[in-house]
Image (tube, rainbow, N blue to C red):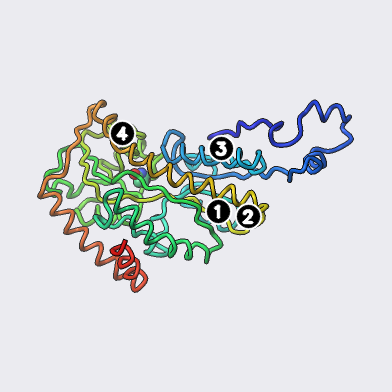
């Protein structure tokens, strides 16, 4: 958990001053007298570990908000699903149990296929395409979330998704019958179409899932591979670059609207900066983490032409299937994407 390190003295009145006044005035009265509203403390659940670049970016975001509001809005990050489990974060923010939180967008695929558009294989598999897809999908996704009283503050992609195994993957046929860890609907579907046996496992549970033999392979980024020390239980990483799924930060609309106008503006400005910084960090992360894996003995390879062919066929089938579920709105989104 990332602790709030801002001293109370920066958030309200200073302690010596309080003493001089002999405790006649309360802290609240003092802060009001000094022209500040009382500090608002927010708890923010996030699903991934402290060292993950998304969490580091969010921590910077909360520091920026604290600085820009002179401590008036003080957000404490609770990482690794420690306060609220990943699967509960969206509904917890929606119901106002917590005012703000982070989750992977494609986790909402079951309620609405549009949230899964960033995880359709080969639809947007590099940063340029992923950015275009985000520009084409941001408004429609924001509107859907608004309907649930959620405000989308920013979204940042993971590095491109590849395949981790205990053997070399040449054609994809090798994955038949292999127990494969998945984290959203499309990684599960892809595993099934490869003939593998998918199991959903959250990132903090990856080492145990491999250690106990629940899974023997996974689809994820170089980032998550390195963060979970993939070399302890896997030997190969195929940099197949299937898709770039995004994490998003959402805030409860009622909690947002209860903030003073300048604070809302500070939050939005910090969110805009976090989105830019996050996209850059994600790009840098790809190579840095591939290198860490190589240094630790993981054999990293590019996909063979046969594997690309196999994965692209599966990708086309999944795109069709996705369009069937996403209907006219999905079609409109893909058209907007092709015009970017
Ligand atoms: N890491 C997260 C989501 C995608 C990624 O690269 C995970 O594996 O669950």
Q: Earlier in the sequence, mark 4 or mark 2?
A: 2
Relative to 27, 219 lies left or right:
left
Choose mark 1 or mark 3, whichever is in front: 3
Q: Earlier in the sequence, mark 3 or mark 2?
A: 3
Q: Which element carries disc 2, helix, strand or loop?
A: helix
Relative to 11, 196 lies left or right:
left
Q: Earlier in the sequence, mark 1 or mark 3?
A: 3
Note whether residue 33 is visible. yes
* Dots 3, 2 in contact, CB < 8 A: no
Q: Which mark is residue 289?
A: 4
From this view, report whether residue 211 is shown above or below residue 149: above
Q: Which mark is residue 63?
A: 3
Could you give the CA–CA distance between mark 4 and mark 2, rounded to whole angstroms?
A: 37 Å
Q: Circle 1 sits on which residue? A: 251
Q: Circle 2 sits on which residue? A: 255
- Residue at 16% x, 44% y: name it: 303
């Amino acid at each position: 958990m990332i602790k709030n390190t801002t001293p109370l003295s920066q958030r309200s009145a200073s302690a010596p001053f309080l003493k001089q006044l002999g405790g006649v005035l309360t802290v609240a009265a003092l802060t009001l007298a000094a022209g500040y509203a009382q500090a608002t403390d927010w708890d923010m659940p996030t699903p991934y570990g402290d060292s993950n670049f998304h969490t580091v970016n969010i921590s910077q975001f909360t520091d920026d908000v604290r600085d820009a509001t002179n401590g008036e809005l003080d957000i404490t990050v609770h990482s690794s699903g420690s306060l609220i489990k990943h699967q509960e974060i969206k509904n917890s923010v929606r119901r106002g149990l917590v005012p703000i939180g982070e989750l992977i967008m494609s986790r909402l695929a079951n309620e609405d296929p549009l949230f899964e558009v960033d995880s359709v294989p080969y639809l947007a598999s590099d940063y340029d395409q992923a950015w275009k897809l985000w520009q084409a999908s941001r408004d429609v996704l924001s509107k859907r979330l608004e309907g649930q009283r959620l405000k989308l503050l920013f979204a940042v992609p993971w590095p491109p998704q590849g395949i981790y195994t205990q053997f070399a993957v040449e054609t994809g046929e090798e994955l038949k019958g292999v127990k494969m860890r998945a984290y959203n609907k499309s990684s599960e579907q892809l595993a099934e179409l490869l003939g593998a046996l998918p199991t959903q496992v959250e990132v903090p549970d990856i080492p145990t899932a491999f250690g106990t033999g629940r899974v023997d392979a996974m689809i994820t980024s170089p980032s998550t591979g390195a963060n979970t020390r993939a070399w302890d239980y896997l030997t190969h990483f195929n940099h197949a670059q299937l898709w770039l799924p995004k994490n998003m930060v959402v805030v409860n609309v009622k909690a947002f609207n209860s903030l003073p106008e300048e604070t809302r503006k500070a939050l939005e400005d910090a969110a805009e900066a976090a989105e830019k910084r996050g996209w850059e960090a994600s790009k840098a992360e790809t190579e840095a983490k591939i290198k860490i894996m190589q240094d630790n003995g993981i054999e990293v390879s590019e996909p063979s032409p046969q594997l690309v062919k196999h994965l692209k066929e599966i990708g086309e089938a999944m795109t069709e299937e996705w369009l069937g579920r996403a209907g006219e709105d999905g079609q409109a989104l893909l058209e907007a994407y092709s015009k970017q």
